[in-house]
């Protein structure tokens, strides 16, 4: 039985675009380096910095594109947003989390549930979902050129790192 619909409902109950926009307004004037010392800072990779937005019933991760990502230009970011929009269509039964992209204060961010490490008890479900996800992305004309980084929320595993998602064509 999939518990995904629960996560989706909880995500949309928790997501308030104006609160995410307020966070982006606060972070925009700061350098990427200065943002690392904030209490909300969760972590970062080469392309995104992740910040916690405490909310109920789920806390959220607001993952802000770094300049290493946006330097690709507006067209590049637009294509990536199109790829995310397409991935959102295949949320169910895959490792695609409920997520949304917001642009505010000159920043681009992707918002999704904040996840925790996946326990070993989740390994079988995870392997099944990795296969389903790869197939579903392929069918949707998408490619994810990265090892999937998975976390879980409410018992549901999902991929958190979408920086390498791209349209095939
Ligand atoms: N939804 C999330 N829940 C918990 N931690 C997250 C989430 N999204 C991102 N992170 C943390 O932020 C880090 C950087 O995000 P990620 O999307 O992997 O950036 P990059 O594309 O630059 O590698 C991740 O390695 C993870 O530790
Ligand atoms: Mg990445």
Image: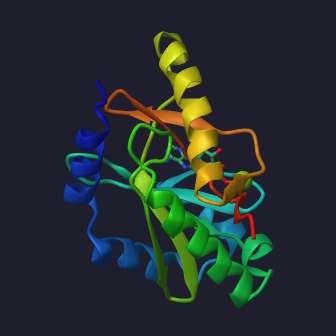
* Percent of width and height locating residue 16: 26, 69
- Specify the quadrant that holds the C terminus: bottom right
Say left or right for 29 vs 1: right
* Percent of width and height locating residue 111: 44, 62
Can the viewer see residue 43 in this picture?
no
Q: Nearer the viewer, residue 28 or 151?
A: 151
Q: Nearer the viewer, residue 142 or 7?
A: 142
Residue furthest toward the front?
Answer: 139
Q: Nearer the viewer, residue 88 or 109?
A: 88
Residue at 48% from the left image edge and 39% from the top image edge: 94
Say left or right for 86 vs 23: right
Residue 12 falls in image quadrant: bottom left
**Above or below, comparing residue 78 to residue 169 in the picture:** below
Residue at 28% from the left image edge and 23% from the top image edge: 1
* Percent of width and height locating residue 38: 53, 60
Residue 73 falls in image quadrant: bottom right
């Amino acid at each position: 039985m999939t518990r995904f619909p629960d996560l989706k409902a909880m995500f949309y109950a928790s997501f308030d675009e104006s609160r995410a926009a307020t966070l982006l307004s606060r972070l925009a004037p700061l350098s990427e380096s200065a943002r690392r010392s904030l209490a909300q800072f969760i972590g970062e990779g080469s392309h995104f910095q992740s910040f916690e937005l405490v909310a109920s019933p789920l806390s959220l991760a607001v993952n802000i594109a770094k300049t290493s990502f946006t330097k690709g230009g507006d067209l590049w970011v637009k294509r990536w947003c199109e790829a995310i929009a397409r991935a959102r269509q295949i949320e169910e039964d895959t490792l695609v989390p409920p997520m949304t992209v917001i642009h505010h204060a000159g920043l681009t961010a992707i918002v999704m549930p904040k996840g925790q490490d996946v326990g070993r008890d989740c390994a079988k479900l995870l392997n099944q979902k990795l296969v389903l996800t790869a197939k579903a992305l392929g069918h949707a004309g998408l490619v994810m050129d990265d090892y999937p980084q998975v976390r879980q929320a409410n018992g549901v595993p999902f991929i958190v790192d979408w920086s390498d998602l791209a349209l095939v064509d």
